[in-house]
Amino acid sequence: MPAIKPKAAANPDQPLRPHLINIKELAFVLGRSAESLSRDDKAGTIPASIKLGSSVRRDWNELLEWVKAKCPDRKTWEAREKGEPSGSESPRPPQAGTSQPAPKARRRRKAQAQSEGVQS
């Protein structure tokens, strides 16, 4: 993201980095159109925005972390931020004796039972 030169700062040689950016700035950084990002926002595939009055902004630092996390969908991202397990994590293995046979095994047994019934 291009640096913003401050109008009045203690050190004018040090550019300020914005903490909040709008959708057009995000589109420029990601190399995508603002329209496609708006569709992604509605679909829940990018982090949620922050509403300030009538302005809609995104947290620059959160977006950097989101990209480092390989751009998970919003539900996964928010669960991760809260420290909750998300639906994309691998499920626990079944406990011994409580699991159902795999679908392939069930189909094989069913086919075997049918073929035995036909032969009799």
Image: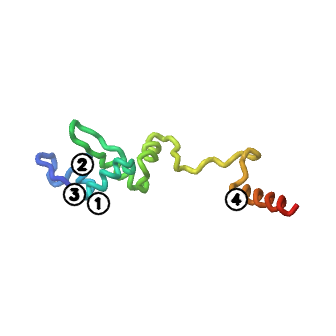
Residue 56 as seen in the image, left or right of residue 48: left
Between the residue at mark 3 and the residue at mark 4, the CA separation in whole angstroms equals 55 Å
Residue type, mark 2 in image: Asn
Is residue 104 something one can see in this rendering?
A: yes
Residue type, mark 3 in image: Pro
Q: Is residue 78 above or below residue 68?
A: above
Q: What crowding class fits label 4: few (fewer than 14 Cα within 10 Å), some (14-19), or many (20 or more)?
A: few
Q: Which residue is mark 4?
A: 104
Q: Which quadrant of the view contains residue 3? A: bottom left
Tag 2 and tag 1, C-beta contact below 8 Å: no
Residue 107 as seen in the image, left or right of residue 115: left
Between the residue at mark 3 and the residue at mark 1, the CA separation in whole angstroms equals 16 Å
Q: Which mark is residue 2?
A: 3
Residue displayed at 48% across by 41% down:
83
Q: Is residue 32 above or below residue 49?
A: below
Q: Which mark is residue 32?
A: 1
Residue type, mark 1 in image: Arg
Q: Secondary structure at mark 3?
A: loop
Q: Quadrant of the N terminus?
A: bottom left
Between the residue at mark 1 and the residue at mark 4, the CA separation in whole angstroms equals 43 Å
Q: Earlier in the sequence, mark 3 or mark 2?
A: 3
Between label 3 and label 1, give the one nearer the viewer: 1
Q: Which residue is mark 2?
A: 22
Report the residue that reaches farthest toward the right. 120
